[in-house]
Amino acid sequence: MSHLQDPAGAEVSRPDPLGSAATFCHAFQQTAADHATETALREPDGGESLTWAEYAARVRAIATGLAGLGLQRGETVGLMMVNRPEFHLLDAAVMHLGGIPFSIYNTSTAPQIREVLANARARVVLCEEQFLGRLREATREGTVEHLVVADRDRCPGATTLRHVQQLPPPAGFDFDERWQAVTPEDLLTVIYTSGTTGPPKGVELTHANLLCELRALDAVFPLPREGGDVVSYLPMAHVAERMLSHYMPMLLGWRTTTCPDPAGVLGVVAQVHPSWLFAVPRIWEKLKAAIEPPADEDAAIALRQRLGLDRLEAALVGAAPVGRDVLEFFHGIGIPIREMWGMTETSVICTANTPEHTRLGSVGRPLPGTEVTIAADREILVRGPLVMRGYRDDPVRTAEAIDADGWLHTGDLGSFDADGFLSIVGRKKELMISSGGKNMSPSNIEAAIKAHSPLLAQVVAIGDRRPYVTALITIDAVAAAAFAAAHGLADHAPADLIAAPAFASELAAAVERGNAVLSRVEQIKCYHVLPDDWQASSDELTPTMKLKRAAIAEKYADVIERLYA
């Protein structure tokens, strides 16, 4: 139970939505009533701001309009938008009708969009005007009947949300009846995987899945019931972003500040001073490279305030390996980053380091109610209420992923220590086998090398069916500029610095230091430095910053062959 005061000043109790909500529709309505006058959604720099009461009223109006458009219970609706308040309004409106909202990566090409829409069987897509061209190309054939532009009152040749909201609702429509009919086993969303190992798969997650996730997390990492602040900046097609900045606030009344450009997230964080922050390793690495270690605790306090990280109750990292040097650096300045592990198919987080139980270099212990075991081939298996319902319209791949006993075969390899902390040692499908028959994890090799210099943005280990390990390396532009300034070098762009002897020497030393912690067969024997860093949704990286290993091997085949010449 949580507490508030009635008009006479007496304290009254209200149900805790984490314990009482059966669905996120129920949670949303309860939170909107309990926190009516508090800010729910806002843009940075004094932009649009909505209270929970205004949020709820807009959701009701939009849902009524979508019902007038013909949206039925159980139908999917695509959303293609940057991080802005309208996303939350639209997603919640679809959810309240018993629909299934899902997000499309904004960087997707028309063929990729077509593939996802076909699998989802969506009739309606809600979008921003900037994405209309690609969506029109993607929907020339298929199931989509309505493209609705949400950020313009008038848009020639397209339906607008304003027009949809003016449609009369169907006869007998009752908004409250529609959301109250939603059940815990109904789908809350479909999350499309980023496609590192083939075509995206539509992961079906129910209201029950995500409610169990948040309750399990609360048991080991207590979630604040009042005054929570989060920044929404990762793609909403990323399940971790949906959980942290969309579903958690629905349960707990937190305030969400939207950041439409991920490149500006650190500036927004400095404004907001969030209480919870999730970031992929690359963001923590960039932040580490950009700041000087404080001289003492007083300086560390000033640094945390300047960065907007002084109110953090939880700093989280996941989705890829993070260097121990990064974890130690932030622990040292009073920002203990908690490494965790999970996947879309496990409703985000499955194991986590917590304030009471943390072991650097591990991804923590399993959340309550979740079973995690290691198979004979070292694959991590998971069973419990966090596991997805299945892959959309794909019974074959669903059966391959979830066995007859309910164990999800994650594809990750790991091991438990004597105290029950899990360590990830690689991906089953990414294991390299040298020509001498040695099994190696490329991600472990890459993390070992990256940990020894902030100059290293990406390291890609090559060695499958090869006599020795080589690597492709990209350079971090911020760290490169700092290095150039410190060494009096006029040119500071990575492409210009590659040929500088001092720079080349520093890279060689970093690789040597990384090799020292690897076995002889894992050590990088030679490498090639590429002139440009890679960005999310490029040929080399997925939207969630994972390496596209097959694409990299193909694109840089000539470079790789020269490393073995």
Image (cartoon, rainbow, N blue to C red):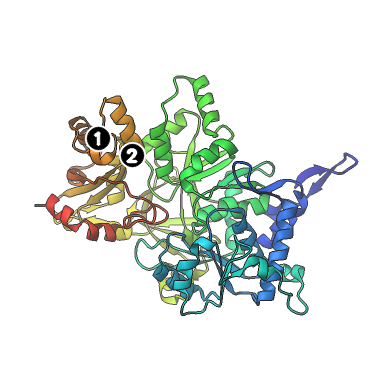
- Kindly identify the amino acid type of the residue bearing the numbered disc 1: Ala
| Disc 2 element | helix
Label 1 element class: helix
Task: Say left or right for 437 vs 542.
Answer: left
Instruction: Please name whichever residue, 500 or 541, is drawn nearer the observer in this view of the structure.
Output: 500
Expressed as whole percent of the image width and height from the top left, the position of residue 36 reads 76, 50
Q: Position of residue 252 (x, y in %)?
A: 67, 49
Q: How many marks?
A: 2
The extreme right residue here reads 8
Residue 477 is labelled as: 2
Please determine whether, in this image, residue 553 is positioned above or below residue 391. above
- The residue where tag 1 is placed is 510
Residue sitting at x 15%, y 50%: 468
In front: 426, or 304? 304
Looking at the rendering, which quadrant does residue 110 occupy?
A: bottom left
Q: Residue furthest left?
A: 565
Q: Quadrant of residue 542?
A: bottom left
Mark 1–mark 2 distance (CA, rounded to whole Å): 17 Å
Judge the density around disc 1: few (<14), some (14-19), many (≥20) Cα neighbours within 10 Å: many
**Amino acid bearing label 2:** Ala
